[in-house]
Image (cartoon, helix red, strand yellow):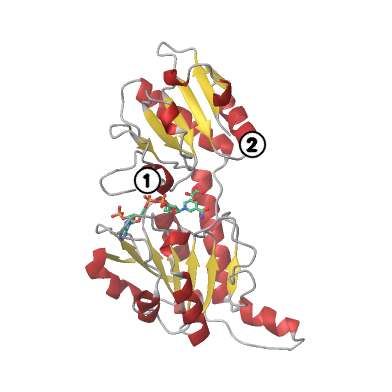
Amino acid sequence: MPMTLRTAQDQDATVAVAIGDSARAAEWQAALIDAAPDFTIVRAEAMAAPAVADFAVVWRAPLGMLSRFPRLKAVLSLGAGVDGILSNRELEPGVPVVRMVDEALTQGMVEYVLWHVLRYQRRAPELLAAQRRQEWLPIAAPLASERCVGVMGLGVLGEAAARRLTAIGFRVKGWSRTPRQLDGIETFSGTTGLAGFLGGVEILICFLPLTPETENILAAPLFAALAPGAFLINAARGEHLVEADLLEALAAGRLAGATLDAFRTEPLPADHPFWKHPAITVTPHVASLTRAASGARHLAAEMRRILAGEAPLHAARRDRGY
Ligand code: NDP
Ligand code: OXD
């Protein structure tokens, strides 16, 4: 649902927002008015002259959207992942893309991760299945310090999750593209570091951006390199996962369970096998939602920086794809 935002500032910025969800469009419009009271906010579809737009604020930038705005100073993302924007062939080469970085988004993701990691560590799936059978099953759960959690992607979200998991006692390993050093976390990087990272991991969490290098990474060879009976949590993108390989690894017992928040097709089709699989938990891309109030403050601050001739704080790098 597109809308526009017009400022009364010297440069008279106009921003087009498209998120494809009218309820959230109204919420974002209100939040942007609060965050930038000196801006005038208008729905884009009501714009008489889209050619004057300085900024586009979008979720996945539907085709036909960006091409309506030929004079953009930047495209700002409503989500942390910018794959849906960077892959848009209507994005002009010199136009910066700004990522969503927001404390509330990070906190929400950390809570999602704690929920599922603790669920697996405390053997909740087995206990709940026993309850359904009315079976008293006094199984012991290992302590966090006896569990090894692997975090793929040590960016804004992965680092925050890895630190919190370390703080509550888990043994945490992390993997990134370039070398990172994080207190109390064993870190690995690049393709050469992948095997060392995966070895011994009992709960694997994916926080990678979707790029040509990371697409289909959650596949049979990777599952085989984890500790036998490991769990997978994919809070990144559906395209990271080879779905057939997951089903096969679960059937063979190489993986014990998976929690999936993002899918190749969203909403997940009604007849998809993941819905009813006893070892798969499906959540509908809600691991962490961008909060409009704090997200709009971030957007307003980045737009003001650009209007003032400064570089945005959280620009995606097109050369690396995230
Ligand atoms: P960042 O860009 O901050 O971090 C990305 C991390 O992945 C970096 O550590 C980066 O390495 C690493 N990385 C990138 N490419 C590779 C590679 N080829 N090999 C190894 N590591 C790699 O992203 P965020 O933490 O903000 O977000 C991560 C993803 O989470 C988003 O792209 C999005 O897909 C997903 N997401 C999902 C949400 C949901 O509700 N399900 C909500 C928000 C985000 P380096 O440090 O070297 O750059
Ligand atoms: C995402 C988000 O990138 O929701 O998936 O922020």
Which residue in the rendered view is the most extreme toward the left?
Answer: 192
* Visible residue check, residue 202: yes
Q: Where is residue 175 in the image (x, y as percent from the top left)?
A: 32, 64
Asked if residue 77 lies left or right of residue 27, the reply is left
* Visible residue check, residue 168: no
Give the residue displayed 40% in from the left and 33% down from the top. 75
Element carrying mark 1: loop
**Residue type at numbered disc 2:** Ser
Q: In which quarter of the image is residue 241?
A: bottom left
**Residue type at numbered disc 1:** Ser
Is 298 or 318 nearer to us in this picture?
318
Dot 2, how many residues are within 10 Å of its Cα: few (below 14), some (14-19), or many (20+)? Answer: few
Q: Position of residue 262 (x, y in %)?
A: 52, 59
Q: Where is residue 91 in the image (x, y as percent from the top left)?
A: 36, 36
Which quadrant of the frame does ligand 1 lie within? bottom left
* Labels 1 and 2 touching (C-beta < 8 A): no
Q: Quadrant of residue 31?
A: top right
Calculate the distance from the C-alpha at mark 1 to the C-alpha at mark 2.
Answer: 24 Å
| Above or below, 235 relative to 192 | above
| Above or below, 252 relative to 308 | below
Give the residue displayed 52% in from the left and 60% down from the top. 263
Q: Where is residue 319 in the image (x, y as percent from the top left)?
A: 25, 45
Q: In which quarter of the image is residue 268?
A: bottom right
Mark 1, ligand 1, within 8 Å: the answer is no
Is 265 or 213 nearer to us in this picture?
265
| Above or below, 75 relative to 226 | above
Q: Name the residue under label 2.
A: 22
